[in-house]
Image (spheres, helix red, strand yellow):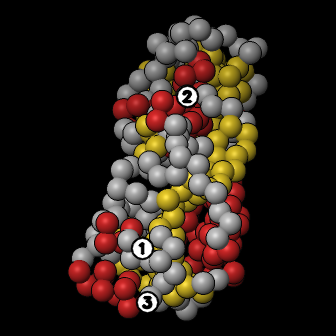
Amino acid sequence: MRVIFMGTPDFAVPSLCALADTFEVALVITRPDAVRGRGKRLEPSPVKAEAASRDIEVIEANRMTPEVLDAMRAVRADIICVAAYGCILPDAVLEMAPLGCVNVHASLLPRWRGAAPVQRAILAGDERAGVSIMRVVSALDAGAYCAQASCEVGDMTSAELMAKIGELGANALIESLREIEAGTVTWTEQDESLVTYAHKIEKAEMKLDPADDALENARRVQASSDAAPARCAVAGKGVRIMRATICEDMRPSIGAVEVSHGRVALGCADGAIEVISVKPDGKREMEASAWAAGLRGDDIAWERV
């Protein structure tokens, strides 16, 4: 089976690897090089880097121009597979391959259609998250699905959960393509009455606030990312909280900070969160115990920024 693969971030790499190990990936479409991480330099997408290491032809594109479409048609692929490519696909792509176009979507559809399904699942307190292998249709993430796989959310960060779901999606994609090729696949239409939307995470949503419940603040930390970090100010200084948990044995008042034996708790509306690791502005990430050594005074406060 000849495959065109369309994807960009780390989440998509396991699917590309699985496809390349099982079928013939004739072409990869990915977003152009961009400034990533701390280096402020143009870097290839994770998918481009993986494709290059396997000597697979790569086209970089932000949109489906006539030139890109012509290059895709020339490949004469049997199927197109998409995983977090980052661009709405026109009908010309959806109708191009004889076996259609399928997507690895990081949610248990019909729950969490849209751009940020993993983060929304965490913020909503979902016990399980997962992936769906679905047909790509014109409407956003509305196609029928043929496979789903899930895992417990637990205390995984959004990055950890995304990585786990990426691996589940890769396995599900291969099994689905085998069934599609054999003509034995079964498609399940989504129940429109159960649809929820995972709108893009805005930075303001992730700001920690002592006026909010401890659970809400803890979920913000768990769901945070480099693009939308969980931030606050402690003793007047900005800090990103990297990991935190609900604190049961330390009870600082709302907006107060309790430091005890290398532990740090932030008082919320109904309890407290314990900080596990932090990244103070302008500094490296560190454990809370190291950070606590620099917090001086008996009346330390924290606030929303």
> Dot 1 corresponds to which residue?
30
Residue at screen point 59% across, 54% down: 187
At x 39% / y 68%, what residue is drawn?
A: 94
Tell me if label 1 and label 3 are in contact, CB under 8 Å.
Answer: no
Question: Residue 296 location, x and y as percent?
Answer: 58, 24
Which image quarter is the C terminus in?
top left
Task: Report how far apart the C-alphas of labels 1 and 2 lie in the structure.
Answer: 31 Å
Name the residue type under label 3: Val
Residue occupied by mark 2? 124
Residue 39 rendering spot, x and y as whole percentages: 43, 67
Q: Residues within 10 Å of mark 3 (few under 14, many from 20)?
A: some
The residue under label 2 is which amino acid type?
Answer: Ala
Q: CA distance from mark 2 to mark 3?
A: 42 Å
Q: Is residue 71 visible?
A: yes
Question: Sequence order check: which comes first, mark 2 or mark 3?
Answer: 3
Residue 181, quarter of the rendered image: bottom right
Q: So how many labels did they put on this image?
A: 3
Which of 292 and 172 lies nearest the eye of the viewer? Answer: 172
Furthest residue to the front? 183
Return the residue nearer the eye: 174 or 117.
Answer: 174
